Amino acid sequence: MVTYTSGLYRVTQVATGVAGSPYYYTAYFAQNGGTAQQAATAWRDFLSAGVSTYVAGLSFSNVSDVTLVDPVTGNVTGTTPVVLASVAFTGAGDPLPPATSMICRYRTGEYVNGHEIRGRTNISGLAEPDNLAGSVITGTQTTWNARLATLITGGTKVHVVYSPTNHCWATTTAATVSSKWAVLRSRRD
């Protein structure tokens, strides 16, 4: 069932330090599914399982607050403090082109006006060893799919897909990494 009743946490992680950055990784979580700190920690854990995840030189800024969003109006209703330290990455290999990103796709199984509420996250800052002939290598897909499973199941947070067009959100029930790289046109150099 599409949900309108609970506000949302919008967690944004900023990454800087390499060509094409800053990168902004944003996720939404239901306020009635846990605390802002739990949402922020779950998002950081998903994005960063270790310092070799991204190319050397990329770093995540500290996260000191989470934005509160009214899903019906889309308006920001405030912020709440959280604590996540900055992280510097040490991954090996040449960086992929700045416009290249891995895409994580979210499904909800909820429909509005005949269309499923779906979402995605583009992950930039990965390295050439994650690439094989223009595709995401199987090992990287497997690793990130496991992280996605952890993000959307269990724990004390509820990852959601927010649909500002439909003024609602729905709980994420399935998520996968695409085998093909995505191109963020706004990131072309």
Image (cartoon, rainbow, N blue to C red):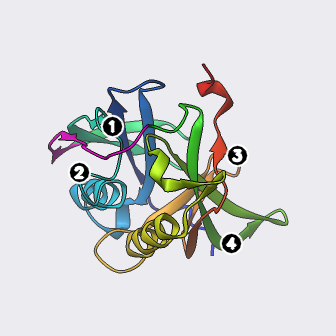
- Identify the image quadrant of residue 172: bottom right
Alpha carbon distance from label 2 to label 1: 32 Å
- Whole-angstrom CA distance, mark 2 to mark 4, is 36 Å
Decide: few, some or many residues near mark 2? Use Cα within 10 Å; few <14, some 14-19, many ≥20.
some
Query: For residue 78, which numbered disc appears in the image?
Result: 1
Q: Which residues are magenta?
A: 81-94
Tell me the kind of residue under disc 2: Val
The residue under the point 44% across, 45% down is 127
Task: Tell me the mark number nearer the camera, choosing from 4 and 1.
Answer: 4
Q: N-terminal of the two: label 4 or label 1?
A: 1
Residue located beneath label 4 in the image: 110
Mark 2 touching mark 1, by CB under 8 A? no
The residue singled out by tag 3 in the image is 165
Q: Compared to 24, does 92 lie above or below? A: below
Secondary structure category for the residue under label 1: strand
Check disc 2 and report the residue beneath it. Answer: 51
Q: Nearer the viewer, residue 2 or 129?
A: 129
Q: Quadrant of the C terminus?
A: top right
Numbered disc 4: secondary structure: strand
At a point 62% along the width and 71% down the height, the residue shown is 108
Task: Classify 142 as above or below 130.
Answer: below
Contact? badges 1 and 3 (CB < 8 Å)? no
- Nearer-N-terminus badge (2/3): 2
Q: Quadrant of the N terminus?
A: bottom right
Q: Mark 4 is on which residue type?
A: Glu
